Image (tube, grey):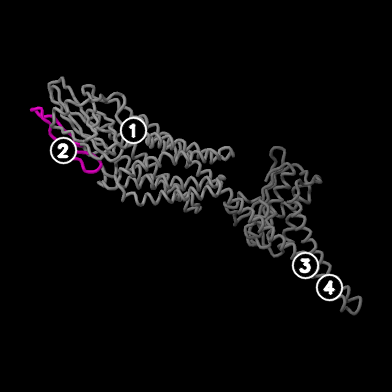
Amino acid sequence: MNRRLMAFTFLIVIALSGAALPAQAQVDVNCATSYHLDPSGRLNANDESALGSVAWEKFRDRAPGFGFSRDVLWVKVECQNDGSAAESRVVSFDYPLLDKVIHYGQTSSMRFIQLGIGGDTQGPTGSALKDRNPAFIIRTPPGKILNIFRISTLGSLQAPISIFDPKEYESNQRIGYFLMGTYYGVMGAVFLYNLIIFVTCFDVLFLIYSLFIVAYFNFQMSANGLWSSHFGLYWVQNQGMSFAMFSSVAMIIAFASTFLRTQGLPAKLVQILLGAAGVLLLMAVISPLIPYQYTAPAGAVAGTLVPILVLVLSATLWRRGNRAAQVFTIAWGCYLAGTMCLGIKNLGLIPPSFWTNNSIQIGSALEMMLISAALGMRFRDLEQSNSLIESKYLASDAVARMTQMLAHDVRKPFSILRMGLGMLGSAKDPAAVKAVLSRLVPEIDKAVSSVDGLIADVMEVGSSSTALIQELASPESLIEATLGETFRIYPKASIEIGYDLRHTHMANVHVQKVGRVFSNIVGNAVHAMGQKGRIWFKTRERDGLIEFCLGNAGSVIPAESLPKLFDAFFTSGKKGGTGLGLAIAEKVVKAHGGRI
């Protein structure tokens, strides 16, 4: 599952990276763009002399980014239509978190009028399109036409601009929303994956990562402008953005400290980190009460520094050779690269572009893919650990039962002997003594044989090798001896015996040990059938060996028991069973160079 998820997410990242590239390349060459930064915010679109006298900077390959500035950004789009018919273009500012963008268009009298308003604090009006990015329709009649945009925001001030033909814009939007929906779909799948594992094994680490995905989903919905554009949740889009940032960073610390603690991170450092996560959660709770212009920079700084801290901590554990810690380091390296790129862009230190605008999506997709792989390793480790504990428990339980059986069987001949001594003491003549001994000796012999068999089984399983004294014996004699031993143990059994013997050679075997193999198997069958039914023996020669097939009708070995069938001390509830019979059978058969 992890490998499929990794491959799927990788393809998404590649598609996300490649499919959106044409959007930046589809700029209308007949339109020139420039911008002006207005620190005072007093410029007026209708003050032609003021707008005409300011210094306009041309948009080159670097879109303007000014960090968390309170200045007003003016953008001028001057289009030249050399045709004879009016055309339309879409001007898109490819940054969803701009609070307010006002579109002014030039009239026939060369005056500017307000045509539309967009941004994430209100619904689109006039020429503004309903989209996650502020986007506007501009009309370009023959000749030259001028459009001006006034941009103000309490968040990061930047204006990466694209100009499209309307059809190209629609095509670009469909691709973008498809890839974004796929990205959120992968995020939802990873969330369900970790939640299901948590419900399965109740490991708090999977719950924390599930909560991180929920917080991060909220952050991404805000960062991509989807809360306001598609759900009309403008307050969540703005004031809730800080809550999303702080809660995401808090869950990063909580998850990282919990995960790295299992890889050897000192307990005191874990406590400090969890304390920091608690502080960030408190900041998340109170952030909606604080103006966004103060919480947004703090959230951007925290979102940049915390992944660096996590990466440093995980890298220090890399040296110990833990695979999960190595994958964790690489995963958070990808996330850190994306987060730092976005944070530095929001601070205005690098220009907005497709890569910087979507860096956190690309980095987080890789992070989720790799973290899921690391958690998958942890889940497998937990399964193996639980399986080992269960095996040790079963072995301990089996040893305890074996000890009880040995103690019970060892005491039995002594109990019989004590009773017999009492009877002999009260005997009045030799005839009475002889009568007591005639009853006592077979019972003692039977009890001693049982103890001797148990001890022999334990010694056989515990020994590193099986000593063989081989001699030629006919398969018929082995079967006959097996049936004699079986019916001695089950004298009231009503069993039909079938034969299909197709061998032509004698078997070179340790007769006593192979006899025990057959007796164990046939005895299990008789017990499983309730001492009624049919048992068959088949033989044939193959690859220089004699193949024996021992089968029974009416009962089957449960499928879940098959992998553990030859494990020492494994038993499926047989009364008095030690779980050693088939373990010994496998060992004896392998010692003969065969297989069972």
The residue that mark 2 highlights is 126
Q: Name the N-terminal-most of marks 2 and 3.
A: 2
The residue that mark 4 highlights is 420
In this image, 336 relative to 115: left or right? right
Q: CA distance from mark 3 to mark 1?
A: 89 Å
Query: Magenta stretch?
Result: 102-128
Q: Is residue 103 magenta?
A: yes
Question: Where 447 sits versus 501, above or below?
Answer: below
Q: CA distance from mark 2 to mark 3?
A: 100 Å
Q: Secondary structure at mark 2?
A: strand
Q: Name the N-terminal-most of marks 3 and 1.
A: 1
* Rendering coords of residue 233 (x, y %): 27, 47
Which amino acid, mark 3?
Lys
Q: CA distance from mark 1 to mark 2?
A: 30 Å
User: What is the crowding at mark 3: few (fewer than 14 residues within 10 Å), some, or many (at least 20)?
Assistant: some
Identify the disc placed on residue 412. Answer: 3
The residue that mark 1 highlights is 348
